[in-house]
Every structure is written in structure tokens, then in C-alpha cells.
Amino acid sequence: MVSKYDGSKNAMPQMSLFGLGNKTGIEHNYFFALSPGSEVRAQLCLVAEELRTAHALNGGWVASERYHLTLHHLGKFPEIRTDLVARAISAANKIQSRAFEIKLDKFMSFDSRTGKFPIVLASSTESPELKNFWQLLKNNLLAVRLGEHLMNNFTPHATLLYSRQPSKEMPLPEPIHWPVKDFVLIESLVGKSEHIELGRWPLTELCREGNQ
């Protein structure tokens, strides 16, 4: 994943904050997401390889560097939206939330109108911490007038493949435990299969017992 972020919570991407930016001929899809750490990313790669060999799934596999769990879509545009990015960063800067953990323990497919069925990893139980964080970020986005593309429901998942056929729901042999320590703002260059990280915000680490 390419990054335009320098690590400071209040940093802005290196682009003009005036107007809509330059038209490039490429569609720009903006969204907030959770990005897995190296250990979780390796586990996702292993599951993808097992699915590839054991279930003979065909289609377009997602590159491991683009694995993520989408929180909120902000829209897809023909031009760079620096105005939208500035407001999104403003909303993210106001987030105060503790780190938490999610569990992915099944794979399944979503319905498709395009003939490409997303094969995803998901959870059999809802995570209250993730749902609360999703709602907190949504509230902040609404406050900066970025609610046009926000959804009213949330099914957390990490997509591994866009398959030519659907797959039945099955449990994973071993669940993936994903420590959520930060969240990111991503610009996806549609058609180039490239993700650009525009911002990353750490969550507050939980105090360990005995160190409180």
C-alpha cells in the first residue's frame, strides 16, 4: 500500500486543499478501513491459499497488500477530492477510542448483480466494540457533512476473492484474532488496483492488568 501519510495524527496529505483537485482519468474511491498488521495479513494469506487449493474457487484474488476491512465508503469520483479528504481527516482527528480485538471465523459469499461474487471472511458473532467504533466514526463524518454515501448497516468482512460462482458459508478451521490498534483513510485508484493510504490514526492501548 502506498502512503501519503507521515505518521503524525494531525498531518494532512501532500495535496492542495482548495477545489476538487486535478482530473486524472482515473476514478478515485475513498473509504475508511481497518488495515491488518503483518501477523494478521499473513494469516489472511494462508486462508486464501487454502481456499484456492481446497475449494477450487476461480476469479480475481485480492492482492495481500490490499487486504482490509471497510468501515465507511465516502464515494467514488472521477477527480481527486481534496476537499472531501480534508473533511474526512478532520472527522478522524476527533476520534477517541480504545483498541479492541475482532474475530474472523467463517468464510462466505455475498450476492452479486455483476456476476462477481465477493468471497469474504466474516464473524459469526457481532463485536460490540467494533460496532460502537463504526458508529462513532459515522457520527463524526455526519458532523462534517460526509453522510451522502454512508450506510445504515454494517457487516464487517475482509474480501479475499471476487469469484465467478457463489460459495456456501463455512467455518474456518481456526479463527483469526485481529487486534485493532488503528484505522486508516484510503484512496483506491479504480482500475489500477492500487491503494493509497492518506491517513492513519492510532487507538488508545488498553492498560494491562497490574499496570493500571
Image (cartoon, rainbow, N blue to C red):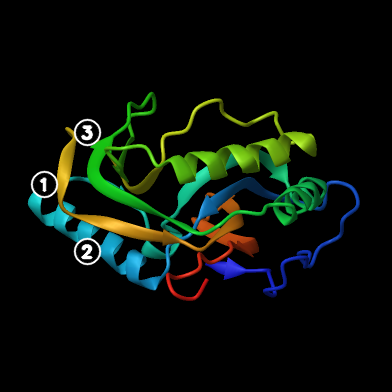
Work out which residue is located at the far left of the displayed protein and give it: 54
Q: Earlier in the sequence, mark 3 or mark 1?
A: 1
Q: Is residue 140 visible?
A: yes
Q: Can you tell which of label 2 and label 1 is closer to the viewer?
A: 2
Q: Relative to 188, does residue 39 appear above or below in the rendering? A: below
Residue 76 position, x and y percent, is: 64, 39
Identify the residue under disc 2.
46
Q: Earlier in the sequence, mark 2 or mark 1?
A: 2
**Residue shown at 66% from the left, 54% from the top:** 96
User: Distance between the Cα atoms at labels 2 and 3?
Assistant: 21 Å
Q: Relative to 189, does residue 150 appear above or below in the rendering? A: above
Q: Secondary structure at mark 3?
A: loop
Identify the residue under disc 1.
55
User: Which class describes the residues within 10 Å of circle 3: few (<14), some (14-19), or many (20+)?
Assistant: some
Q: Secondary structure at mark 1?
A: loop
User: Distance between the Cα atoms at labels 2 and 1?
Assistant: 14 Å
Q: Earlier in the sequence, mark 2 or mark 3?
A: 2
**Residue shown at 51% from the left, 59% from the top:** 99
User: Which class describes the residues within 10 Å of circle 1: few (<14), some (14-19), or many (20+)?
Assistant: few
- Report the amino acid beneath label 3: Gln
Q: Is residue 149 left or right of residue 38?
A: right
Residue 152, label in figure: none
Residue 123 position, x and y percent, is: 30, 42
- Report the amino acid beneath label 2: Leu
Which residue is more in the foreground, 58 or 145?
145
Residue 4 position, x and y percent, is: 68, 69
Which residue is more in the foreground, 85 or 123?
123
**Residue shown at 71% from the left, 39% from the top:** 141
Q: Which image quadrant is residue 77 in?
A: top right
Identify the residue under disc 3.
165
Q: Is residue 209 left or right of residue 46?
A: right
